[in-house]
Image (spheres, rainbow, N blue to C red):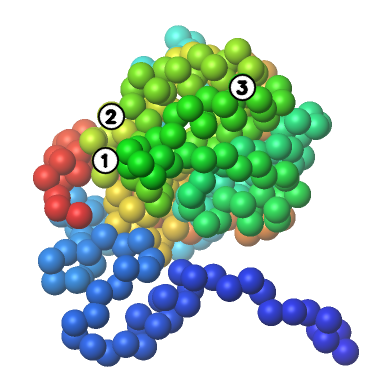
Amino acid sequence: MVFDTLEVGPADVMYGLKIAADKDKSPLKVDLGVGVYRNELGDYNEMGVLKKAKDELYALNPDHDYEVTTGNSRYLANAAKIAFGSHSSVFDKERREKVASVQTISGTGAVHLALMLLARSSKKNSRQVYIGTPTWGNYIPMCNLAGLESKQYTHYDTLTGGVDFESVIKAIRTADEGSVFILQGCCHNPTAADFSREQWQTLAAEMKSRHLLPLLDIAYQGLGNGIEEDSYGVRHFAQMGFEMIVCQSFSKNFGLYGERAGACHVVCASETHVQPVHDQLRCLIRWEFSSSPAYGSRLVDLVLSDSSKQAECNQEFRTTNY
């Protein structure tokens, strides 16, 4: 028989909790499993600006063709601008961008794609990926899937409830040159222990001296201290001239969970490296899922392409009780 040697896969706590919560019909239940922000009634919380964008998209009545393999270019440009800032050094004066951006199946897909790209790197040490724990449960399995070696260090200090910064710095100083560090940009999952601006600055200086590659996962931008504030780490590393990867999601902040709208941005040393990197990403997407879902990215694009809608969005981030 073909499948008789297959064993049951490792248990997924989140999957089990979701199944159990859906089966529980008690009106008093509270689902603390899957990360979805809900209102006081326990229902899906839709942003006002998103409702307007949905009405606008409905009126535009776009077709249902596939997006190009690498995604909607305007959406990607807008996504990059809120991650890096519109005046970032990654966009030079001649607009020769040093960023290779592609659309992904939300943040999970962005991280997976980034790790698959790193696995194809010719540099041996780029196969070592450092992950601070406790952390999001998918990082280590995805490293394994990509054939990358994951190394763990302590991120969370149980005594202070903050970052164990001594542990982080020790990991950086002992890592092999060229190693990758996965760092969460804001609203750390699952500890909420974020780096301060001063700690981001120290991290950047230490990683620069060790020639390490940051992989910044920014899945909650806008839900911490605001769009600009939550991207401080990303923008500081970019200003320092790092080669880096930024994995972006609009699931949490825009409430587009099931629409799977994300992006992967690879900042290259120069514009000459952008095309080969972009083409490798194109190949990986084509071979795996061909193209990303269109609906959610179209909604995000409508909001980010309109300054008044973006201002309204930022205001909702500041005032909504998630």
Mark 2, other Cα within 10 Å: few <14 / some 14–19 / many ≥20: some
Residue under circle 2?
Answer: 229
Please say whether residue 126 is visible from this viewpoint: yes
> Closer to us: mark 1 or mark 3?
3
Rounded to the nearest angstrom, the CA distance separating label 2 from label 3 is: 27 Å
Toward the front, the furthest residue is 159
Q: Are marks 2 and 1 in contact (CB under 8 Å)?
A: yes
**Quick check: 101 above or below 299?**
above
Q: Residue at x 44, y 58 (%)?
A: 260
- Left-right relation of 92 to 85: right
Compare residues 268 and 166 and report the one nearer the observer.
166
Q: Residue at x 32, y 68 (%)?
A: 32
In this figure, what is the number of numbered marks?
Answer: 3
Residue under circle 3?
Answer: 173
The amino acid at mark 3 is Arg
Please say whether residue 266 is visible from this viewpoint: no
Rounded to the nearest angstrom, the CA distance separating label 2 from label 1 is: 8 Å
Residue under circle 1?
Answer: 224
The quarter of the picture where the N terminus appears is bottom right
The amino acid at mark 1 is Gly
- Left-right relation of 5 to 268: right
Instruction: Tell which circle, 1 or 3, labels the residue nearer the N-terminal end.
Output: 3
Q: Residue at x 74, y 38 (%)?
A: 127
Q: Position of residue 174 (x, y in %)?
A: 66, 25
Q: Position of residue 75 (x, y in %)?
A: 41, 41
Q: Residue at x 83, y 86 (%)?
A: 4
Asked which quadrant contains residue 149, the reply is top right
Mark 3, other Cα within 10 Å: few <14 / some 14–19 / many ≥20: some
**Quick check: 233 above or below 219?**
above
Rounded to the nearest angstrom, the CA distance separating label 1 from label 3 is: 29 Å
